[in-house]
Image (spheres, grey):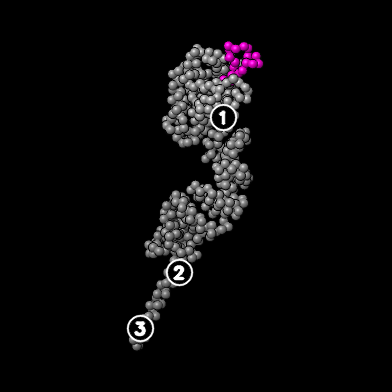
Amino acid sequence: MGLTTIVIIAVLFVVIVTVTIILVKSLVKPQKISSIQKLIKEQKYPQAQKLAKGIIAKNQRDYLAHYWLGKAYLADNKSELAFMEYKTVNENALFNGDIPEIEFRRTMAELYKKFNQPQDALKEYLLLTKLDPTNAENDYNVGQIYESMGKGAMAMGFYQKCITANKKHAKAHSAMGYLLYRSKQYTEAKKEIDTAIHLSPDTYSNYYYMGKILKDNNNFSAALKQFEKAERDPLFKQRALIERGSCYAAVTQFDNAITEYEHAIKISKDESNQETLYARYFLASCYEKTRNIEKAIEQWEKIFSRNRSFRDVATKLSQYKEIEANDNMKEYLTCSAQSFSELCKKIALSGFNLTCQRIEQTKSGCVMLASDDKKEGWMNQRQQMILVQFFRDTNPVEDSVVRKAADSVKAQNYEKAILISSSEFTRTAMSFAETRPINLVGKLQLETLLSKAGI
């Protein structure tokens, strides 16, 4: 046998061996991958992971094995490890059919969201809107991420696109409704939320926002019913109770409001969260309006112990601390409505020599029509009446209140108005009163009047 023949035989042998090895590998690998799939299906996750790791140990660039290792980790609730494998696939793999790209990218987006990487999740969902354009859920997810980034207009566009693809997509209708509500487009918001409720009556967050719209339009009775339904959602229950309390407070049903606020506080799992602090703050406001100052102070103190800068709580406590040391002012602020009317009559007579002709209770105190005691009987047509308003609130009286009093003086042809407050008046209120027939009596002057009246 010649040398040439030997060389040819040797080359053929090498080729045959190489082809055989390639064929064996190509046959063995699919068998191993199918074995991983079978183990996952049988919920034998550790074995599936071990087999996938064995393949990767021999070839780090086997991205199909990385993919199935990630699938095994996901099935085994090992999200962090799955995320690492999926990222490896995402950064390196060519999607040639072995890895289902749409399913992969959907899972990849969910993992990015889970691990607080919204920008990367957004890229995946945007790609999905092109790979799977008929799936409205992709547009909805894009909208959700844009909304979380504060890009409401972008979010709205994708919610609309989602609804165009699927008119019965309840979550998109809800999301649009909430965005419209926050931008004060109440009519449009109500329409979207109505649709969402029709499509998904068990999504109780929709009732919360419907209640907010009705409340903002002063339809308190209808709002109460919506908030009651919203209580079925654990995430909205406390907020719904607070809103119910606010509805009752708006129509001066303070006992009912107090019940709702107390319930909201009772179910709280965190004394420091904003909802609980607001429930206590509004509860204190109800106590203050019903002249139960001790209970109001108790709520303010609880708020102050959790958050020293919460709204005007520190100011309230400071003001009432001063009042506690002044028996006359304490009586003015805490006495019953009937006693308060009699007290105001004494102040008017001793302080201004005015005789009360008519007196009515208001939310913040009372309003009186009086005549000068020195003049002839008040029935005399020529005798002018004087408007006297008493406020027992720790908040400064705003210029809007003074303007309203000035309008009444002018419209009714009163001689003048006297506004008496247990607090003070804002700068704009004092500026407005300077050139008008209105006398403003603040806290210090009131203390003098109370002493003079012998309270």
Which residue sits at x=42%, y=30%?
305
Distance from the alpha carbon under mark 2 to that under mark 3: 30 Å
Read off the residue under disc 1. Answer: 249
Residue 387: % across, % down: 58, 20
The residue mark sitting in front, 3 or 1, is 1
Q: Quadrant of the N terminus?
A: bottom left
Upstream in the sequence, badge 2 or badge 3? 3
Distance from the alpha carbon under mark 3 to that under mark 1: 102 Å
Mark 2 closeness class: few <14, some 14–19, many ≥20 residues within 10 Å: few
Q: Which mark is residue 7?
A: 3
Answer with the quarter of the image where residue 306 lies: top left
Please give the range of residues in magenta.
Answer: 369-389
Which residue sits at x=59%, y=36%?
215
Disc 1 is placed on an element classified as: helix
Residue 358: % across, % down: 61, 17
* Amino acid at the residue labelled 1: Ala
Read off the residue under disc 2. Answer: 27
Residue 190 visible in this rendered orientation of the protein: no
Disc 2 is placed on an element classified as: helix
Whether residue 287 appears in magenta in the rendering, the answer is: no
